[in-house]
């Protein structure tokens, strides 16, 4: 894996609608912002990490990582964050992780990179379903990504299906991709 030109992006550019319009990545869990847990897990796996964010940019810059805002206005969702990051970092590969997934597998990057063959996109699959926020994308998909966004198609699942993306199995990692979308989910996690 050491010779793969790769950057990770932590996706923190959403509106947080289900979280009461609060910035999820900055909400505390175990006395640290949610995004800090994701960054810590990624830092042990690779050296280049950026943050995709649209609000509270100074707070996100406080983590000491480059912060990339969406190039496409209007909160285009994770697909917009993926596009802007892939466009900005110039690495051959981009690996993604949402900011609200504190149990990100510690071998996530290694397993995704081990799957590289002739596909240009890979997506994690746990024992339940596809985890579309967890992708490995080759920069050659930028034209398709731009075209998808230009037509107003912002669904990551549809985009990955159209490429198509190869699935990478994480069936042995139950709950590793759990994301925190509501105040109740955050409170339940904090009480454990």
Image (tube, rainbow, N blue to C red):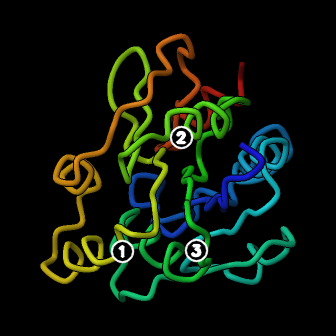
Q: Decide which of 113, 103 is in the foreground and name it.
A: 113
Secondary element at image label 1: helix
Question: Which residue, given by chain and number where applicable, does mark 1 sit on?
Answer: 142
Which residue is found at the position 70% from the left and 29% from the top?
Answer: 107
Comparing labels 2 and 1, the label whose residue is closer to the camera:
1
Secondary element at image label 3: strand
Specify whether 42 is left or right of 123: right
Q: Is residue 138 above or below residue 113?
A: below
- In which quadrant of the rendered view does residue 60 lie? bottom right
Specify whether 189 is left or right of 37: left
Question: Which residue, given by chain and number where applicable, does mark 3 sit on?
Answer: 53
Which residue is found at the position 82% from the left and 37% from the top?
Answer: 30
Screen quadrant of the N terminus: top right
- Tell me, for residue 42, which label it has, or none: none
- Residue 119 is situated, as x and y percent measured from the top left of the image, at 35, 47
- In which quadrant of the rendered view does residue 190 lie? top right
Q: Is residue 130 above or below residue 14?
A: above
Crowding at mark 3 (Cα within 10 Å: few <14, some 14-19, many 20+):
many
Check whether the beta carbons of the residues at disc 2 and disc 1 lie within 8 A of each other: no
- Residue 48 is situated, as x and y percent measured from the top left of the image, at 76, 63
Comparing labels 3 and 1, the label whose residue is closer to the camera:
1
Secondary element at image label 2: loop
Q: Decide which of 51, 90 is in the foreground and name it.
A: 90
- In which quadrant of the rendered view does residue 72 lie? bottom left
Specify whether 62 is left or right of 8: right
Which residue is found at the position 75% from the left and 49% from the top?
Answer: 28
Which residue is found at the position 58% from the left and 40% from the top?
Answer: 113
- Tell me, for residue 180, which label it has, or none: 2
| Earlier residue among tags 3 and 2 | 3
Q: CA distance from mark 3 to mark 1?
A: 19 Å
């Amino acid at each position: 894996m050491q010779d793969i030109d790769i950057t990770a992006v932590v996706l923190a550019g959403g509106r947080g609608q289900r979280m009461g319009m609060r910035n999820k990545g900055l909400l505390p869990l175990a006395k640290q912002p949610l995004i800090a847990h994701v960054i810590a897990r990624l830092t042990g796996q690779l050296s280049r990490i950026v943050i995709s964010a649209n609000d509270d940019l100074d707070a996100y810059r406080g983590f000491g990582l480059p912060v990339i805002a969406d190039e496409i206005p209007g909160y285009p969702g994770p697909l917009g964050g993926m596009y802007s990051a892939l466009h900005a970092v110039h690495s051959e590969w981009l690996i993604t992780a949402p900011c609200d997934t504190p149990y990100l597998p510690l071998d996530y990057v290694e397993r995704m990179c081990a799957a590289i063959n002739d596909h240009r996109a890979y997506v994690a699959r746990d024992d339940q379903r596809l985890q579309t926020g967890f992708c490995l994308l080759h920069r050659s998909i930028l034209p398709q990504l731009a075209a998808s966004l230009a037509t107003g198609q912002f669904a990551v699942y549809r985009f990955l299906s159209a490429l198509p993306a190869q699935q990478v199995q994480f069936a042995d990692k139950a709950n590793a991709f759990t994301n925190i979308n509501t105040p109740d989910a955050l409170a339940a996690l904090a009480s454990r």
